[in-house]
Amino acid sequence: MTRANAITLLLWLSAIALVTWILSDLPLAAMLQGLMQLSAGQWILWLTLNVLVMALSTLRWHILIRALRGSVSFVALTSIRLAGQTISFVTPGPQFGGEPMQLYWLYKRQDLALHKAVLSLGLDRFLELWVNFAVLLVGAALLLLSPRMAFADWNQVVLILFVLLLGVPILFLGLFRRPQWMTRRLHPLISGWLSHPRLAALRSHRDALEEDLRELLLRRKRVLAQALGLSILNWGIILAELWLLLVFAHISVDLQGFTLIAVAIRLAMLLPLPGGIGTIEAALLWSIPMLGYEASDALVLIALMRLRDTVILLAGAASLAALRSRSNPPR
């Protein structure tokens, strides 16, 4: 077993042990009973919101690829996104992990130029991550200004998120405007490989990527604005879905309470455990009692969230199996 596989296995065992310990003393039968009480209309509304989240995420990626003059169908891109999310789910941290395989599928299966695949996926993840930090920063700032939420030190959270919110675009634009800065620092590490014939192709891809990025930033600002708008709209739907789950779980909260739950969940998802297993449960079992509810009141909410994750995981696994079963197209 490789070191990477051993670390992944250890993280999975830790996550499973954590969620088992958290839920061991809770009445799991109540979770199933809460699920059975949902009406058909509630199931349909919940499903619709989750389909919209996936569709808008894929649409953002799709318009970025089209802006780069690439051609990948929306259906194929949805399958690639689902499969990538499944890989990310089983790697440390549910935010990243499936990107290398997504690049491979775009390049090999969809015949998209490598530099366009890298740039489109990089911009897609950048926008998603940046808006994620922005929403978290607004939420943490609201909690910081609320006297009711003084039971936690939100100053450090706000400061870290503010640094990340500014640091990510500064680093991105800095590397774009001064790529030689990174080249000079990497040169001692790669000097022995510079004569390899494959590097000529890599340099060609890099030059093409820089040219496409320059064109997007200078001439296709409307496309970037549309992609940013889709990210913000998508986050609105994600928050609406959380509010809907709270209604399903009969948890009534005001804006400050809702913000606490949302921030706790999203911060838990940033921790390096596969799928946020254990950390999300711990976040809910911490935040909901802070709002005057019993820990058991979070059971239905936990069950609903994990049911959603399971359905998405199964859909992604089916997409992954379909992608792996197809033969490579001729190039």
Image (cartoon, grey):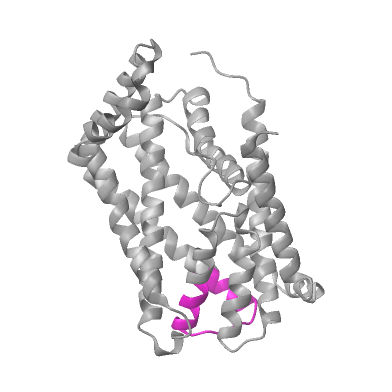
**Quadrant of residue 115 within the rendered picture:** top left
| Residue 245 part of the magenta segment | yes
In the rendered view, does 185 fall on the left or right side of 60? left
Query: Against 129, is 111 above or below?
Result: above
**Quadrant of residue 153 within the rendered picture:** bottom left
| Residue 257 part of the magenta segment | yes
Residue lying at the far right in this picture: please name it: 29
Q: Residue at image x 57%, y 45%? A: 88
Specify the segment rendered in magenta.
242-262
Q: Position of residue 27 (x, y in %)?
A: 80, 76
Query: Against 278, is 198 above or below?
Result: above
Residue lying at the far front in this picture: please name it: 188
Q: Residue at image x 35%, y 40%? A: 64
Query: Against 248, is 79 above or below?
Result: above
Q: Position of residue 180 (x, y in %)?
A: 22, 31
Q: Residue at image x 64%, y 82%? A: 250
153 or 63: nearer the eye? 153
279 or 84: nearer the eye? 279
